Amino acid sequence: MMKKKIWAGLSTAVLVAAPVASQAANVAAYPQAAAETKADQKLLQLAQAHQGHGPPAKPAASMGGEGDEGGTSGENLAPQLHLYRGIEMIRGHLLVGNELIEAGRWADALPHFLHPEEEIYAGLREDLKTFNVAPFQAALKSLSQTVKAKNKDAYTRARAALDERLAAAETAVRAKQTNGTYFTLETVLEVLQQAADEYGEAIEKNRIANVVEYQDARGFVFEADRLVGTVMQDASTKNADAAKALKASLDELKAVFPAVTPPKQPVKDAGDFLSTIAKFELQLGNFR
């Protein structure tokens, strides 16, 4: 769930990134060090923007908000990326919601089944028309109703029906891509950036204060990891080292969420979380 984002921990990034930037000339001969320097410089730009020292810095892909609630809805994205991003964020919500249902925590799961319709779906309507994909708002609503009713059998049927609709939308988008691996990784980056927003909002005064936002971030990260898995074989064929670095970044992000119930204190602060995503982004050029 999105509100106006305030990045906890980004102010500390200046202390980390400034000395690294001053040493950039000395690490040019070492690719990994150079990559880490670029990641820290990106974080420094975001920190300076947060403190009012410059315009907001954006990565190569848009950091648009989640659905209508974010206000921007990723409107700067191409329709195919916007739609695929939205579908995968829906899947992220369903992933963490299902974890809670399997634990018998139906009330805790409900927000994660309401968010897709309330926050994401409206922004996808035009994209669905563009790709000639049947609307699925009714399927989203039916699923959330089964969660409200705590009806496991009805939930299983409604979830299967929605999964079928989501798979059809994914297939329609992927069919138009000439470089499916890069497109998938680009989508993953968008989903991870949304996870960073949610994670940043979950943290207050060095503790996880907003459980739902923590869980949203968990769902997005684990869905991103699943999505990368669908193209990892091709990515490894294209560039084994870069593919390994992508996986390492995802493993680092997944470790931030040891369980669906958050730890009292965050494993990473929001700035470190974003820095790890920047490392993932730095590898994307290897797959164009």
Image (tube, grey):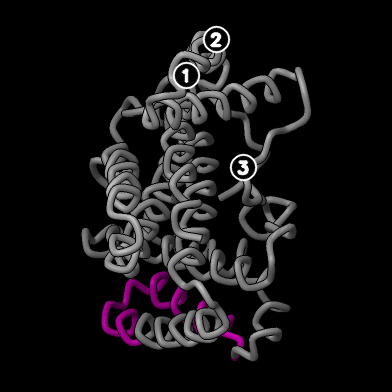
Foreground tag (1 vs 2):
2
* Real-space Cα separation, disc 2 to disc 3, in angstroms: 21 Å
Residue closest to the eye, 198 or 255: 255
Q: Say what amino acid the circle numbered 1 marks.
A: Lys
Q: Say what amino acid the circle numbered 3 marks.
A: Pro
Residue 118 appears in view: yes
- Count of labels shown? 3
The residue positioned 62% from the left and 61% from the top of the image is 119
Q: Earlier in the sequence, mark 1 or mark 2?
A: 2
Disc 2: which residue:
22
Q: Estimate how packed mark 3 is, as few (under 14), some (14 to 19) or many (20 or more) residues with alpha carbons within 10 Å.
A: few
* Residue 242: percent from left, percent from top: 35, 49
116 relative to 242, above or below: below
The quarter holding residue 219 reads bottom left
Q: Element under label 2?
A: helix
Disc 1: which residue:
205
Q: Element under label 1?
A: loop
Q: Earlier in the sequence, mark 1 or mark 3?
A: 3
Query: Looking at the magenta stretch, what is its main secondary structure?
Result: helix
Residue closest to the eye, 159 or 258: 258
Q: Say what amino acid the circle numbered 2 marks.
A: Ser
The residue positioned 33% from the left and 25% from the top of the image is 265
Question: What numbered label is drawn on residue 128?
Answer: none
Magenta residues span: 134-157
The quarter holding residue 81 reads bottom right
67 relative to 271, above or below: below
Disc 3: which residue:
59
* Real-space Cα separation, disc 1 to disc 2, in angstroms: 30 Å
Q: Element under label 3?
A: loop
Marks 1 & 3, CB-CB < 8 Å contact: no
Residue 106 appears in view: no
Drawn side of residue 56 relative to residue 177, left or right: right
